[in-house]
Image (tube, grey):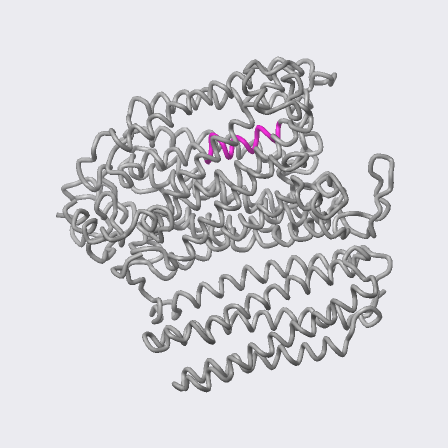
Amino acid sequence: MTDAHHDAEHHDDISFIRKWIFSTDHKTIGLQYGITSLCFLFFGFCLVMLMRWQLAYPMKPLPIGFLANWLGELRMPGGVMAPEFYNQLGAMHGTIMVFLGVVPLAVGAFGNYVVPLQVGAQDMAFPKLNMASYWVYFIGGVVMLASFFVPGGAAQSGWTSYSPLANITVPGNDFWSRLLSGQTVWLIGMVFLITSSLLGSINTITTIIQLRAKGLTWMRLPFFVWAQLVTGFLLLLAFPPLEAAGVMQLMDRVAGTSFFLPTGLVVSGKELLVSGGGSALLWQHLFWFLAHPEVYVLILPALGIVAEIIANNTRKPLWGYKSLVYSVVFLGFMSFVVWAHHMFLTGMGTTINAFFQTTTMIISVPSIVILTALILSLWGGSIRFTVSMLFALAFLPMFGIGGLTGLPLGLASADIHLHDTYYVIGHFHYVVAPGTLFALFAGIYYWFPKATGRHMNDALGRIHFWGSLIFINGVFLPMFIQGMAGVSRRLYDGGTTYLHAQDVLALNKVMSHSAWALGVVQLVFIVNFFWSIFRGRQVANDNPWDATTLEWATPTPPPHGNFTHVPEVHRGPYEYSPPGAKRDFAPQHLPEDA
Amino acid sequence: MSAAIEIPYNTTERPDTGLYNAKLGVWLFLASEVMLFGALFSTYVLLRVNAEVWPTGAQILNIPLATLNTVILILSSVTVVMSWTSLKMNNLARYKLFMGLTLLCALGFLVVKTFEYRAKFEHGLLPSTSTFLAIYFTMTGLHGLHVIGGILVNFYLWLPGTKMWRTDPERFTNRVEVAGLYWHFVDLVWIFLFPTLYLLPGK
């Protein structure tokens, strides 16, 4: 701590703006990413809480009068949600949660804050690029939010922006109304977000490859770093095709090209006056070429966080570290050749379907290897049930449910029945919400003491955990039942007018009330977060969890430049309870455990 | 930002990887760029395969001008290497000459491209006219943006950025090398675009 104090004095000349706004310090940028993405996560969640009113009580005025008034007659005529607004909420919920919430939190925040510390670096390889990456992300977020206020409102074609639906929603015919329409602004926002992730992934990969501390060989890297490395490659190579697709959709909307518009397309009884010759399927191929690796961008950092926390809180090495590493690398490769399993119903043909369902079955193998290794790591451990460990433990079955319910969707014949139903929504939300988000919460509780020097409140943390666990299952479990009954997704009235939805209609209320309760529980987290920054219990030392990895060898919070001495690594990342040692852990940076 | 932090392998190579940071960074960036243009070339293939008729490039586009542009870009790839080797030989004046020539070539390319575009527009050949023209304008336009990006970087290294030569010549030489790698890529993309769009027969 004295070193930190000394260092703080040393850097007194840095102005507030350089320190907190335009900082090049990876930790500050990580925190900027973290706070911003948490705000976006909460905002995206608010959008869906609004939607859930319409789903549970279709065509009833919103009981919160001032909110309905504020949203205005255009969006909520008479307090009842307009269908167009419902579509906007749906599209923007998905976009915000994936591109502005979960990925920036998992990669931007945790990747930025933890990776340089865990590899023993002073900072990222390109600190200025790092700052640029955050600010480009921020602009992208602002652009996305601004799209709610353009004429006609935000994008309405789902987060997937399928063409030709996304092409034809042009409000006027002059240049400016083409440019300032929700979908066009969405595309411009995406270009910013893609640029940001490009800058970030180059930085992460270079940092891991070039700035590893002396002695930190590949098989001594913490699993979290491996996960971030593979994630970096996925972002680097999968996002550009979506950028290309985005540019082409932008051309379709603004310059009147027909990349995604087939010849003779009829909209509302009128043939479109375009050259035609385009392919609607092309958009789906390019989109899913990004969006399937994106699924692994969402899940791999989460697996990395969970691995760190499980090893630390079971006080024993991870079971099968090498299998974990090989699996995650294999997973990264395979994730590029499974994309069309999202498109079984497009009529690609049975040969292509057969190929993609085979690769999909293959990719489930490394996923199950990772999950099994993590579950086996619990065996015989003396588990500390800290809040972060509770979230990490809950992650395992939740991700398990999410993963296993994906298998029927990966088989073309089963997918014909389940495609585009609530079953799909339930499946991927189990992966991302109680899966990834629980892991991210675990990470916040775990690394909070390093970043702030204080622990988060334990009792509030447990309330947050148990409440979240119960209500999140209340939201997503009924979706499987509805989906198997045949209820389609994206129904404005939640299925009220559909015959086959009648038996499972009551579940809409269960899900909605669970979602709102889940929202209330998150308030506990928000209070805990801010209260703990200022009033939380102070950490006893720089390594409060008795952890082995390098980030705990820094002062608390780490100063600019991170380490007081250049760290050197002497052993693997998870040497807990080594035989014959006095303590039950052997930190990577200590030559002999004293 | 403070002077206290010195990122290792900024200038020198890391022994086990044989790379300095920016060189790895630019190769990663170029890998990403390959995916970007790869998606566009895939689009070209898919649109062409699906189309019933596809024009021969020569009927619509100006092959002599494009050939001239190809020569100009290849020349600029040579001069950018010469500028880098000049620095390696410790000759700043020669560097300035060759980097200046590179910039001149790049600007020349853009001028020719502008004439080409204008001729198309004057004949009413717009991106919305046909799928061929849509992919032509999108690919060459995106490539043109890359040329402009390269001009900005090279111009910076040609005039204001040169002051680093006095304080840290090795790092400055690395910067020129990295910018040169990017410039080669821009050249290479055009070498793929030229036969694909201009020379291939239609169907």
Dividing the image into 4 quarters, which one contains the C terminus of chain B? bottom right
Relative to B52, residue A188 above or below: above
Dividing the image into 4 quarters, which one contains the N terminus of chain B? bottom left
Q: Position of residue A395 (x, y in %)?
A: 43, 32
Q: Position of residue A210 (x, y in %)?
A: 36, 62
Residue at x-position 58% and y-position 20%: A69
Q: Give the residues in magenta.
A: A423-436
Q: Position of residue B85 (x, y in %)?
A: 45, 83
Q: Between residue A338 and residue A125, name the one nearer to us.
A: A125
Q: Is residue A532 visible?
A: yes
Relative to A111, residue A464 above or below: above
Q: Between residue A45 and residue B200, name the one nearer to us.
A: A45
Side (left or right) of B71 relative to A222: right
Q: Is residue A368 magenta?
A: no
Q: Between residue A108 and residue A566, name the one nearer to us.
A: A108
Relative to A253, residue B160 above or below: below
